[in-house]
Structures are given as C-alpha cells and as structure tokens.
Image (cartoon, rainbow, N blue to C red):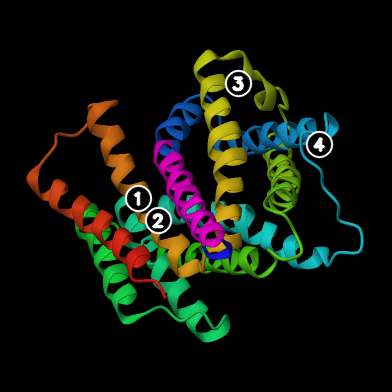
Amino acid sequence: MENNIKKKTAVLAVLAAFFSNFIFGFSFMFSDMGLKVASPSVLLALRFLFAFLILNLLVIFKVVKINFKGKKVLKVLIMGIMQPVIYFYCESYGIKLSSPTFAAIMLALVPIGAMIYSALFMKEAPTLWQVFFGVLSVLGVILISGDGEGATLPGAVLLLGAILSAVMFNAISRQSANEFSPFERTYVMFFLASIVFTAVAVIENINDLSLIYKPLMNGSFLISILYLGVLSSVIAFFLINYANTHLPISRTTVFSNVITVVSIFAGIVILKDTALSLPNIIYSLMIIIGVWGVQKFAK
C-alpha cells in the first residue's frame, strides 16, 4: 500500500515537472508580446505583482493555508533571491549581451549542473544511465539551438550566473520541502520578486511613472500578463516546487530542456516563423528520449 502511494506521488511529481516546463515553453512568445508594449522591468514588475496578488487572494479566501511561524525562513528567502530575482536578471542581460541561441545552449547545462550538485552535496547521485540520457538531452538542445553564434564573455558570465542560480533554487527547494509546503515556497518567491522588480521599474521610470501602469490599457499586454502571471508564474512555479518535494533535482531539472521543444513548436505552429525540418525533429527526439531516460533509469 505504501509503495503504491509512493509510486503515485512520483508519477504526479514527474507530471508536475513536465507541465511546468511545458508552460514555460510558451512564455517566450507571451513575453515577446508584452515587451512590444512595455520595458522588461515593467513587464516583470506587473507579472509578479499580479502573481503575488493571486496567491494572497487564495490565502484570504482560505483556499490555501500558509504558516511561517517558527520556521527557518532565511533558507527560502535565499531560494526566492535565486529564482526568480537573480535568474531572471542574469538570463535577460545574458541574452542581451550575447544572443538567444547562445543563451539556449548555456541554459541547457542546468540539468548537468544539478546532477553534479546533487551527487556532491545532496547524496542523490544519478545512475550512469541517467548521466548518459541527461547528456543526450543537453546535446539535443545544443544541436537544435545552433553553433552558439553571438557568444561574448560578459554574456557567458551572466548566463553562468543564471545556471548557478537555477541549480541552487532547485536544490534549496528540495532541501526545504520537509519544512515548507510548495505553496509557501512559491509565496516567498513571488513576495521577493514583486518587491525587487517593482522597485527597479519605479527607479527606471521615476521621471514618468505612468509608463508602469499605461501598458495595462493595452489588450495584448493584458493577455501576456495573464499568461505570464497565472500560468507561467503561479501554476508553473508551484508545480516545480511540488516536483522538487518528491523527486531528486537531477530528475526535475532535466525537464527544463522540454522548453526548447515547446518553443520551437510554438514558433512553427502558432507564430509560423520557422519551418519544420528533419534535423529539428531528430534533435527534439534526442531531448525527449533524454528526459525519458533520466526518469526511467532513476534509482
């Protein structure tokens, strides 16, 4: 009976990891929609303010309970600084100083970093087959992204910061799972994100604060905020924290490579900005098989 419950929980955690990254795969499309109307700082501020508002409404109407009394909040505060605060800034400026292609290649290394960290510090060493399939998935992302054209040293350093912050976020989320619920971890993350990103938006637009709220008058911007705030923030990050509660980070982080497949799918089917090619199909299959193998050959 207990084994059946554990298996069902593991299956739910795998599904949570998959669907969270599936949601992230479409976030680039909606971010691009929002960035046509507002600056990155304003988009991030409104996204996380809206997400934090939703979490508070769930607490106020007693849909979900939170309790931080007597808990070691410092650990989850560090987690919240790592993701989304440091990660988003390192990713955004890393892309700006290099290229989206090079960024995709660099960020594909997150699962490898997670495997190394979990083996060294969390006593959750992956099996050899997991390492093989993890590398296969990363290789698929590298091949599908191109040759890394546009690489610069400052961009690479910032993207390395994004990799490290992503690994640390997943590790701390996993380590604090016994004390904090997935909702509580998500709540702290958005509390910090809403404060930091709003402060930056105000500082950047201090001469004309109307630039912060005027985008809300635009229909396409509202659609992007709804997707980014509800699906790509509240739901996706809750699912990630749930997955990290029940699975080693070597298994959850490999799903981040699914984002590349979904982004390409969105570009072909929805935006129609690229054509489907045989190499892209092969590289996508490498990513999917790699993700499957990391789950299949877990201890």
Do the numbered discs 2 and 3 sit on residues whose CB atoms are within 8 Å? no
Kindly indicate the quadrant of the structure image that contains residue 210: top right
Question: In the rendered structure, which amino acid carries the disc numbered 4?
Answer: Val
Residue 292 placed where, x, y %? 31, 59
Marks 4/1: CA distance?
32 Å
Between disc 4 and disc 3, whose residue precedes? 4
Circle 4 packing at 10 Å, graded few (<14), some (14-19), many (20+), is few
Q: Residue at x 18, y 54 (%)?
A: 283
Helix, strand or loop at disc 2?
A: helix
Tag shown at residue 255: 2
Question: In the rendered structure, which amino acid carries the disc numbered 1?
Answer: Val
Q: Furthest residue to the front?
A: 1
Marks 4/2: CA distance?
30 Å
Q: Nearer the viewer, mark 3 or mark 1?
A: 1
Q: Which residue is mark 4?
A: 59
Q: Which residues are magenta?
A: 4-26
Do the numbered discs 2 and 1 sit on residues whose CB atoms are within 8 Å? yes
Between disc 4 and disc 1, whose residue precedes? 4
